[in-house]
Amino acid sequence: PNFKLFFGLNNVPENAFEITGDSVANLPDDMPLSSLETIVQALLEVMICGAPSVDVSNTWRARWMGLVASTAFQHNPAIQPRAFVALGCLACEEVDDDLLYQILVALGGALDNFSENDCSLIQSIIMCLTNIVEKLSRESQYLRSMFWLTMALIQIGHIPIFQSAVNLLQVVLRALEAQNFFVENDLVTFLLSSRRPLEKVTMEMDIEAGINYSHFSFAVAAVLLKGLKNPLTKTSTQAALLVFLDIAAKGVNPKNNIISSSMLGYLAALLPMSAKDADMKGLLGLVGISDIDVDDTELQTYFKIFEKLEIPDNRTALLLISLMVTMLHHAESEAESLFLYGFLSEAAKIVPESFALIYDTLLPKMSHIVSTSDTISILDAIHSILYTVVSEPLYKRANDNQYSYLSEIGFNHLMDCGSFQNVTSEKKAINARLSSKLVQCIINY
């Protein structure tokens, strides 16, 4: 019955070919692009199964793809988005750069005309790219740039585009991994080298986003973090962070069960959610930590992991703590809050110089919890923080400003990255224009 809805049929009794007033009532005016993708894939399977031979099937598919391609690159707001979705499904064989060039030109034009009210063309092109990226050859002149294009689309901060772009991000990372780009160089080294030809535009984007890819994992986490707090983007964002963590872990030799500093941003973004979902053991196992006795039960006592983190300097400590405080301000469950307060109570003792910079921003939240919460484990963690601050002379001398330090290292917007609510319409429009500039830079390189 659900499959009939994809074809615009509702309340159909026994005969799916019978259309009545009731059968087409209460249907949405617009077909979701994901539903269209399902239909095209289903029709493609029917065509393959119904063809008398493989050659005939290939002929039919080539003819279908030719018709779709002739439509996709002609301006028609009603048909173009559907054509791009179909084009992505039909591109079964290796895709050449000529076709990808045309798709990128269309994407640049769509970004120039970005509108929050209708971004279906941008979405459809991203969905098309998601299906064809894995079919690009290693020699493609565009494959190495696809990561930065995808991050640019995510930075627009518009939920429908964000959702599609995060799916594309996962596919791009796995495609680069499958082509062995992370064998000679690790993930960060390769991606930063592929960014150099695009730096004129990407630096503008970094300034607008308030991030700095010199601290790569924290920059990625800052861009993706808001996706963890929206039901439409939560699952795909979590999956993307896990892909980053998985690939990064493969390129690191574990030392004494210590988590490399190169993975801290991805891990930090995932830890509170794993505490909520009672999957802390699995997450730590992914990064090679197996000697912490974790009871995967929600709202249990906080398990100390700070000592397992490689924190080479105060800048890394400040970024880590600031990211955790940002997530605390947007925590949705007591399990998340318990983990975050427990983590911060450890940080207060182990890296007091960095914790002192964020203490003032944390104090109002802690005061509210102390006066309203009856969760003993959370209160214990807060009391531990307060006791450390009172007993440590360093905190009495601290008068530096967290924001000025974050700005100095290029993360002046880190504390605002936890929610889509902080992304204004003006910011979306600016980021869309910058994304279009990046597309032009990629196709002209």
Image (tube, rainbow, N blue to C red):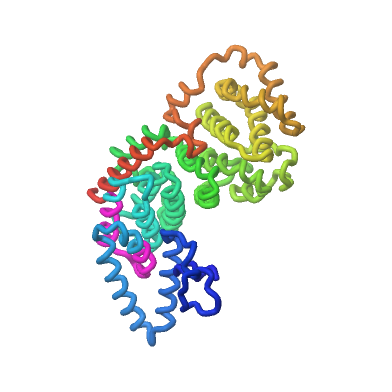
Q: Nearer the viewer, residue 334 or 220?
A: 334
Answer with left or right where residue 314 lies relative to residue 89.
Answer: right
Q: Is residue 250 visible?
A: no
Q: Nearer the viewer, residue 238 or 318?
A: 238
Please tell me whether residue 403 is drawn above or below residue 245 in the rendered image: above
Please tell me whether residue 177 is drawn above or below residue 294 in the rendered image: below
Is 351 colored magenta in this rendering? no
Residue at 66% across / 30% down in the picture?
A: 346
Residue 198 coordinates in the image, percent (x, y) = 30, 43
**Which image quadrant is residue 47 in?**
bottom left
**Which image quadrant is residue 196 in?**
top left
Q: Is residue 352 visible?
A: yes
Q: Nearer the viewer, residue 245 or 24?
A: 24
Please tell me whether residue 433 is drawn above or below residue 87 in the rendered image: above
Residue 382 coordinates in the image, percent (x, y) = 69, 27
Magenta residues span 85-108
Residue at 22% across / 49% down in the picture?
A: 444
Residue at 59% across / 12% down in the picture?
A: 397
Residue 343 coordinates in the image, percent (x, y) = 65, 33
Is 104 colored magenta in this rendering? yes
Residue 404 coordinates in the image, percent (x, y) = 46, 21
